Image (tube, rainbow, N blue to C red):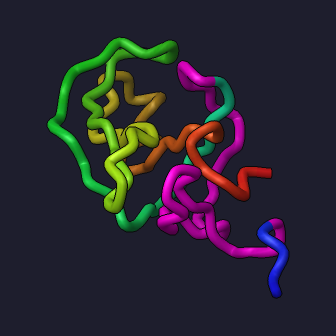
Amino acid sequence: MTNSVDLPVYSCNNCWNPVAFKEDLLSKAFVALSGQAFMFRNAMNLKVGDKVEKQLMTGQFTVADIYCGKCGQVLGWKYFRAHDPRQAYKEGNYIIECAKIVNAK
Protein backbone atom coordinates (compact mmCIF):
# COMPACT_ATOMS: atom_id res chain seq x y z
CA MET A 1 0.00 0.00 0.00
CA THR A 2 1.30 3.43 -0.96
CA ASN A 3 1.44 6.21 1.61
CA SER A 4 -0.51 9.24 0.30
CA VAL A 5 2.48 11.51 1.02
CA ASP A 6 4.43 9.63 -1.68
CA LEU A 7 1.81 10.01 -4.39
CA PRO A 8 2.81 12.19 -7.36
CA VAL A 9 -0.65 13.78 -7.58
CA TYR A 10 -2.83 16.20 -5.68
CA SER A 11 -6.47 15.15 -5.35
CA CYS A 12 -9.76 16.78 -4.37
CA ASN A 13 -10.18 16.38 -0.61
CA ASN A 14 -13.89 15.72 -1.04
CA CYS A 15 -13.89 12.85 -3.56
CA TRP A 16 -10.19 12.01 -4.20
CA ASN A 17 -10.44 12.91 -7.87
CA PRO A 18 -6.84 13.58 -9.09
CA VAL A 19 -6.54 17.23 -10.15
CA ALA A 20 -2.82 18.04 -10.54
CA PHE A 21 0.56 16.37 -10.82
CA LYS A 22 3.36 17.40 -8.46
CA GLU A 23 5.64 17.90 -11.47
CA ASP A 24 3.34 20.74 -12.62
CA LEU A 25 3.67 22.65 -9.34
CA LEU A 26 5.13 26.11 -10.01
CA SER A 27 4.79 27.89 -6.67
CA LYS A 28 3.60 27.41 -3.10
CA ALA A 29 3.57 31.17 -2.47
CA PHE A 30 -0.06 32.01 -3.19
CA VAL A 31 -2.90 32.94 -0.87
CA ALA A 32 -6.63 32.33 -1.32
CA LEU A 33 -9.60 33.01 0.93
CA SER A 34 -9.05 29.69 2.74
CA GLY A 35 -5.31 30.28 3.20
CA GLN A 36 -2.31 28.86 1.33
CA ALA A 37 -2.70 28.00 -2.34
CA PHE A 38 -0.42 26.49 -5.00
CA MET A 39 0.12 27.53 -8.61
CA PHE A 40 0.19 24.78 -11.23
CA ARG A 41 1.07 25.00 -14.92
CA ASN A 42 -1.50 22.27 -15.72
CA ALA A 43 -4.48 20.74 -13.96
CA MET A 44 -6.85 17.92 -14.89
CA ASN A 45 -10.31 16.52 -14.25
CA LEU A 46 -11.70 20.02 -13.73
CA LYS A 47 -14.57 22.12 -14.95
CA VAL A 48 -13.78 25.74 -15.72
CA GLY A 49 -16.43 28.34 -14.95
CA ASP A 50 -17.21 31.56 -16.77
CA LYS A 51 -14.50 34.18 -17.19
CA VAL A 52 -14.88 37.25 -14.99
CA GLU A 53 -12.85 40.37 -14.28
CA LYS A 54 -11.52 40.40 -10.71
CA GLN A 55 -9.39 42.71 -8.63
CA LEU A 56 -7.00 40.43 -6.73
CA MET A 57 -4.21 41.32 -4.31
CA THR A 58 -1.69 41.69 -7.15
CA GLY A 59 -3.90 43.50 -9.67
CA GLN A 60 -6.73 43.19 -12.15
CA PHE A 61 -7.16 39.83 -13.89
CA THR A 62 -9.52 37.87 -16.10
CA VAL A 63 -10.07 34.61 -14.19
CA ALA A 64 -12.50 31.72 -13.95
CA ASP A 65 -13.32 29.52 -10.99
CA ILE A 66 -12.25 25.90 -11.33
CA TYR A 67 -14.34 23.03 -10.00
CA CYS A 68 -13.60 19.38 -9.32
CA GLY A 69 -14.86 17.49 -12.37
CA LYS A 70 -16.26 14.72 -10.19
CA CYS A 71 -17.94 16.35 -7.15
CA GLY A 72 -18.14 20.00 -8.25
CA GLN A 73 -16.28 21.50 -5.27
CA VAL A 74 -14.69 24.89 -6.05
CA LEU A 75 -10.92 24.31 -5.93
CA GLY A 76 -9.55 27.69 -6.96
CA TRP A 77 -9.24 29.62 -10.21
CA LYS A 78 -7.49 29.82 -13.56
CA TYR A 79 -5.77 32.98 -14.78
CA PHE A 80 -6.64 33.94 -18.35
CA ARG A 81 -5.34 37.50 -18.57
CA ALA A 82 -3.27 39.80 -16.41
CA HIS A 83 -3.89 43.50 -17.04
CA ASP A 84 -0.44 44.35 -15.65
CA PRO A 85 2.35 43.01 -17.90
CA ARG A 86 4.45 42.26 -14.80
CA GLN A 87 1.83 39.67 -13.78
CA ALA A 88 1.62 38.00 -17.22
CA TYR A 89 3.55 34.93 -15.98
CA LYS A 90 0.32 33.85 -14.24
CA GLU A 91 -1.68 33.63 -17.48
CA GLY A 92 -2.83 30.10 -18.27
CA ASN A 93 -1.91 28.81 -14.82
CA TYR A 94 -4.16 27.36 -12.12
CA ILE A 95 -4.39 28.33 -8.45
CA ILE A 96 -5.62 25.50 -6.25
CA GLU A 97 -6.38 26.08 -2.58
CA CYS A 98 -4.46 23.75 -0.25
CA ALA A 99 -7.51 23.38 1.99
CA LYS A 100 -9.37 21.80 -0.96
CA ILE A 101 -6.80 19.14 -1.91
CA VAL A 102 -5.03 16.24 -0.28
CA ASN A 103 -1.32 15.62 -0.46
CA ALA A 104 -0.68 19.37 -0.22
CA LYS A 105 2.55 19.22 1.75
Which residue is drawn at the image coordinates 32% and 59% (left, top)?
69
Outermost left residue: 50
Which residue is drawn at the image coordinates 33% and 17% (left, top)?
60
Q: Is residue 26 magenta?
A: yes
What range is drawn magenta here?
5-34
Q: Is residue 38 above or below residue 87?
A: below
Count of all numbered marks drawn on residues in the image? 0
> As rendered, which of 8 and 89 lies closer to the eye?
8
Question: Percent from the top left, x then y, of residue 93?
Answer: 43, 49
Q: Is residue 101 magenta?
A: no
Q: Is residue 52 above or below residue 104?
A: above
> Image quarter for residue 6?
bottom right
Please indicate whether residue 14 sits to the left or right of residue 71 in the image: right
> Image quarter for residue 85?
top left
**Quarter in which the N terminus is drawn:** bottom right
Which residue is drawn at the image coordinates 77% and 69% (left, top)?
4
Question: Percent from the top left, x then y, of residue 39?
Answer: 56, 46
Task: Please say whether residue 89 is visible from this viewpoint.
Answer: no
Task: Please say whether residue 20 is visible from this viewpoint.
Answer: yes
Question: Percent from the top left, x then y, of residue 61?
Answer: 32, 25
Q: Is residue 91 above or below residue 36?
A: below
Q: Is residue 102 above or below residue 74?
A: below
Please indicate whether residue 82 sits to the left or right of residue 8 in the image: left
Question: Percent from the top left, x then y, of residue 32?
Answer: 55, 25
Which residue is drawn at the image coordinates 32% and 48% (left, top)?
72
